[in-house]
Image (cartoon, rainbow, N blue to C red):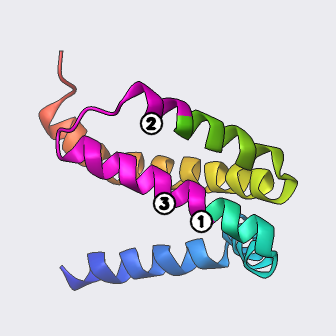
Amino acid sequence: MSNMYDKAHELGNLLRESEEFKGLKALYEEIQQDEVANRLLENFRNLQLELQQKQMQGIQITEEEAVQAQQQFEIVQQHALISKLMEAEQRLSVIVSDVSRIITEPLEELYGTPK
C-alpha cells in the first residue's frame, strides 16, 4: 500500500516541477509584489469564499451578491496580471482534472458509469 502513497508523492513532486506550476507560481509571486493586484485578487477570493460557504450551508445567494461577484470578476479579469494568473490556474486545473480522471478509472471500470 505504501507504494501507492509513494507514487502519489512522486506525482505531487512532478506537478511542482511542471512548467505549468512554475508559471503559475511566478505569476502568483509577481501579484504578491503588486499592491493593487494583490488587493484586488484578495478581495475577489474572499468574496468567492464567502459565497461558497453560504452555498455549503444551504443559504441562498441573493441577486445582489451574485451581481457583486460578477462585477468583481469583471474587475479582476481586466487586470492583465490577474487575468494571466487565472488562465494559468485554469491550465493547471485541467491537468489535475485529467490526472484525477485517470486515477479513478479503475473505480469507474468496476462500478460503471451511472445511467
Residue that badge 2 annotates: 65
Amino acid type, callout 3 = Asn
Mark 1 = which residue? 42
Residue at image x 55%, y 52%?
93
Magenta-drawn stretch, dominant element (helix, strand or loop): helix
Q: Disc 2 marks which amino acid?
A: Glu
Q: Is residue 90 magenta?
A: no
Say whether residue 78 is left or right of residue 75. Answer: right
Which x, y percent locates residue 27?
77, 69
Residue in the foreground of this view, choosing between 49 and 97? 49
Task: Name the quadrant of the N terminus.
Answer: bottom left
Percent coordinates x, y for residue 11 in the rendering: 48, 73
Residue annotated with mark 3: 46
Q: Quadrant of residue 9?
A: bottom left
Where is residue 86 drawn, in percent x and y? 68, 52
Q: Residue furthest front?
A: 64
Residue count near mark 2 (Cα–Cα under 10 Å), binned few <14, some 14–19, many ≥20: few
Q: Amino acid at mark 1?
A: Glu
3D distance between C-alphas at marks 2 and 1: 17 Å
* Residues packed near mark 1 inside 10 Å, few (<14), some (14 to 19) or many (20 plus): few
| Disc 1 and disc 3 in contact, CB within 8 angstroms | yes
Say which quarter of the image contains residue 35.
bottom right
Tell me how far mark 3 sits from mark 2, CA to CA.
Answer: 13 Å
The residue at the far right in this view is: 80
43 above or below 87? below
What is the quadrant of the C terminus in the image?
top left
Magenta span of residues:
42-67
- The disc, 3 or 2, on the residue closer to the chain's N-terminal end is 3
Is residue 99 in sight in this rendering?
Answer: no
